[in-house]
Image: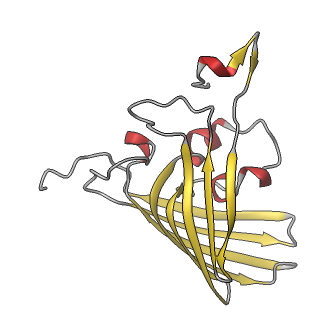
Amino acid sequence: YYNLRSEFKENTFTIRRSEIKVSGKITDDIDFEVMADPSINTSATNPTILQDAFLTWKPGAGFSLRAGQMKIQQTYEGTHGSSEILFAERSQLGRVFGDKRDRGLVAAQEFGDPKGFAGKLSLGAFNGMSDAISGKGTDTNAQKDFVARLDFSLDKVQKFGVYTLQGSTDVTDKAS
């Protein structure tokens, strides 16, 4: 299940996840977030403890544009921060697919009534390196990944939606 470094294990007690996060506003319409997890076992395929580092521009009217290294939005849990996840024990589907990160850009448009029926359309383009090096290195992939999500909520209680991921290859660009 978990690839943890030995210094995070003691007498069967394991620190499975620790999160150091800094977030804030640069201007009224530009936010930033940087998050690192020191319990990550670094390797050639996961060279850094840095998980997220991105800027979000929110010019208004429910539109936002996010650029940087982030989760690639394959699961609902992957679209929210860990502080918003209800249960510590998460599905393996969420861990295997939802927690993947890559460098890219996501444009989103929110619509509707947040207290009633609301929705959010998100379109993203990523380097396509999430399987090769956890999205944490130089882009050598000829193919890019494209994600589209349509999420809905009804009275903040019911949540449902659909998504698609197109691309997902680690094939090297032989032309360069």
Compared to residue 73, the image places residue 49 above or below, namely: above
Q: Residue furthest front?
A: 26
Residue 161 location, quadrant: bottom right
Residue 5 location, quadrant: top right
Residue nearer the viewer, 96 or 163: 96
Q: Residue furthest bottom?
A: 61
Residue for point 40% across, 34% down:
45
**Quadrant in the picture for the C terminus:** bottom left
On the image, the x and y values in percent for residue 6 come to 61, 17
Compared to residue 113, the image places residue 40 above or below, namely: above
On the image, the x and y values in percent for residue 34 come to 60, 56
On the image, the x and y values in percent for residue 88 come to 79, 38
Instruction: Look at the image and name its color scheme.
Output: secondary structure
Q: How many marks?
A: 0
Residue for point 69% across, 38% down:
91
Residue for point 70% across, 55% down:
81
Is 3 on the left-hand or right-hand side of 76? left
